[in-house]
Image: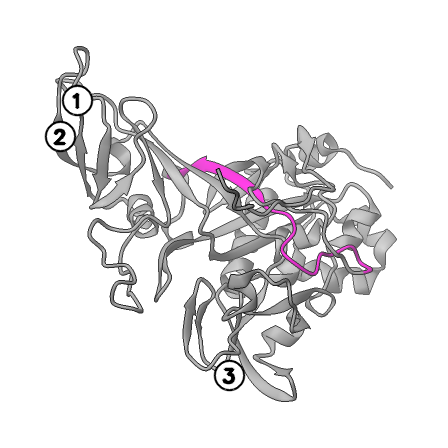
Amino acid sequence: MNRTYAQINEKIAAGKAVVLTADEVIDYVDRNGLEKAAKEVDVVTTATFGPMCSSGCFLNFGHAAPKIRITEAWVSDVRVYCGIAAVDVYLGATELRHNDPANMYYPGEFRYGGGHVIEELVAGKRLQLFALSYGTDDYPNRELRTMFDIHDLNQAIMTNPRNCYQNYNVAVNLSERRIHTYLGTLEPRARNMTYCSAGQLSPLLNDPFYETIGVGTSVWLAGARGLVYSEGTQHCSAVERGDNGVPVEGAGTLALTADMKQMKPAFVRGCSLRGYGVSLALGVGIPIPILNPDILRRTTVRDRDILACCIDYAADYPQKTGKVLARYSYEQLRSGEVQLNGKKVPVSAMSSYHRALEVAELLKAEIRDGKFLLSEPSRRLPANQSMKGLQVKEE
């Protein structure tokens, strides 16, 4: 049995497509068998919700009178990058507010930054732009201050270099002191663990060999119709995999983009990570077309079949030793407690399975209603790509 994208889209447009979430399809295939289910199911929706630091957006303000060639600017006191055209800027999710003390008084609180500005933009709040320029003959204005909201902008385009890690580390702290990381606060002597993944719902864990998710794939990015514009930065597909093909470490990533004016505020949330910085939590949903039984089989991956590496974030992670303390399935992690060196350790998630499931359901509804068609990738993601480290060299 083989299907094409065109055939699936024809069924979607006619309101006849059978769509299940990655959570639902597991039991469906168990009840009906792989071959029968492959004939019946057209699309499986996958999703994730959690902090994605490599995110940001391009904003275009339009021209004021007199015109200004912006060379420095702040939105709600958060600096934006201005090394592009006159009134285009890029706002990064991890940028701090001007004069934030950061970790000067450790651990810093990081109450507000780029991720929070992006959240407020999507929510329609009024923000302040303060812009400076050296002035030119055609752009004479040297200073500008104004209030705006997202509807005043010509474009607000989320452009994220690295989202949706295929798998990720489990973090623990074996040192004698509390540490603060992008995976949360870790208590000394392995008194807690944290992780960040939607496990069996996660997009690239349901498409481990990048058969359907590639450049040009349509995605649900915080409620907006977006797409994959490239493999994400640090995409590293040449990794150790289990017998089911699923990586046991970070592996693939996606670069995503979408129109922020179409996004839903509930799925765009600024994060303050004590002692580390600011970030942006996003909801991402990606449909997987069931082109053949093998693709369907891979979407039935269970939490118990997906392993993640436990790393000491006090020593091995910052020093890049490569040491793995243990491997846990997401079924073990989601139980809330695991064993490490004979000791019970409580586990918590930085991501939200509940919100990821909500995303998968919303995407399913849009496809069933004929509002979200699938797009065939123009090219596949790199299938055997490694990742280089930075070599510190003398001049």
Q: Are there few (<14), some (14-19), or many (20+) residues within 10 Å of tag 3?
A: few
Q: Nearer the viewer, residue 255 or 172?
A: 172
Which corner quadrant of the image does residue 28 belong to? bottom right
> Residue flagged by tag 3: what amino acid is it?
Arg
Name the image quarter holding the N terminus. Answer: top right
Q: Dot 1 corresponds to which residue?
A: 64
User: Quick check: is 248 in the magenta stretch?
Assistant: yes
Q: Circle 2 sits in a helix, a strand or a loop, which is it?
A: strand
223 sits left or right of 261 in the view: right
On whether residue 282 falls in the magenta region, the answer is: no
Of callouts 2 and 1, the N-terminal one? 1
Q: Is residue 69 left or right of residue 22?
A: left
Judging by the rendered image, the residue that carries numbered circle 2 is 144
Identified by mark 2, the residue type is Leu
Residue drawn at (37%, 47%) of the image: 93
Mark 3 / mark 2, whichever is N-terminal: 2
Which region shows up in magenta?
A: 243-260
Residue labelled with disc 3: 189
Please state the horizontal and vertical placement of residue 215, each as a whole percent of the image.
62, 33
When the figure is inspected, residue 147 is found, relative to residue 302, above or below; the finding is above
Residue 243: x, y in percent? 82, 60
| Coloration mode | one colour
Task: Name the residue: 24% across, 50% down.
Answer: 97
Marks 3 & 2, CB-CB < 8 Å contact = no
